[in-house]
Amino acid sequence: ETGVTQTPRHLVMGMTNKKSLKCEQHLGHNAMYWYKQSAKKPLELMFVYSLEERVENNSVPSRFSPECPNSSHLFLHLHTLQPEDSALYLCASSQGGQGGETQYFGPGTRLLVL
Amino acid sequence: GQQVMQIPQYQHVQEGEDFTTYCNSSTTLSNIQWYKQRPGGHPVFLIQLVKSGEVKKQKRLTFQFGEAKKNSSLHITATQTTDVGTYFCAGRPGTYKYIFGTGTRLKVLA
């Protein structure tokens, strides 16, 4: 499946680094999502963009900064992360952005913060 | 806050046995979706239920949405090794966001 791609697939960073995660969807969808998946915890919705406008910000720390330049691209900018931020970060997209649609997930970026 | 709980957390079954996972929400849901995540993979959409009491089938998988729209179940008949993975429900309490359940990790022993 190549509908939603994410880069990099793996990332190791120090707490003082700045990095960005990239997501691209090739499905013509108009809504994109960032999720965090930690071990033994449910998928946590971080941000939702619908028609390039952020419509959901789920009390995420400011060290995570999303950017959606157009409906096909989504970034997650990371800075001064903590070890507890180590997780699988999943991007998803859907058509409609009203929340009732199927979400198509990318393969994720596995992040390790040292 | 709004929560979606799933039980059991883990389930090991012999190949050919049946399997059921249950999803319970603290609030009424407008709809519920089910996803499967293979080991090392990402969640893949299985189905969406919208109506109270709805039942849908996909081959050996049967999905139910409770009458009160606060719970749901996924039943797999005669499991196969290809069924291994984590099954998540995701409920939508009427806003943009889906609240994912804790997931049930299924292991099928050949």
Image (cartoon, rainbow, N blue to C red):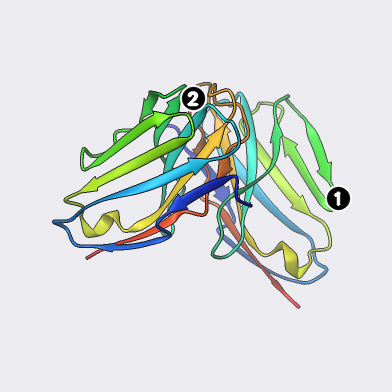
Looking at the image, which residue sits at the far right? B59
Q: Report how far apart the C-alphas of labels 1 and 2 lie in the structure.
A: 30 Å
Give the residue drawn at x 53%, y 21%.
B94
Q: Would you name the residue on which mark 2 appears?
A: B96
Q: Would you name the residue on which mark 1 appears?
A: B59
Residue B101: percent from left, percent from top = 53, 45
Q: Chain of mark 2?
A: B
Give the residue drawn at x 44%, y 32%.
B2
Between residues B36 and B19, which one lies in front from this camera angle?
A: B36
Check the image and report above or below for B63 versus A84: above
Do the residues bearing badges 1 and 2 touch, measured as CB atoms within 8 Å? no
Dot 1 falls on a residue whose secondary structure is loop
Question: On the rendered structure, is B14 left or right of A79?
Answer: right
Between residues A55 and B65, which one lies in front from this camera angle?
A: A55
Q: Which mark is residue B12?
A: none
Between residues A32 and B77, which one lies in front from this camera angle?
A: A32
Dot 2 falls on a residue whose secondary structure is loop
Question: On the rendered structure, is A62 left or right of A40?
Answer: left
Residue A28: percent from left, percent from top = 59, 31
Which of the 4 quarters of the picture holds residue A100? top right
Check the image and report above or below for A14 versus A57: below
Give whichever of discs 1 and 2 has the lower sequence position: 1
Residue A92: percent from left, percent from top = 51, 41
Check the image and report above or below for A98 versus A107: above
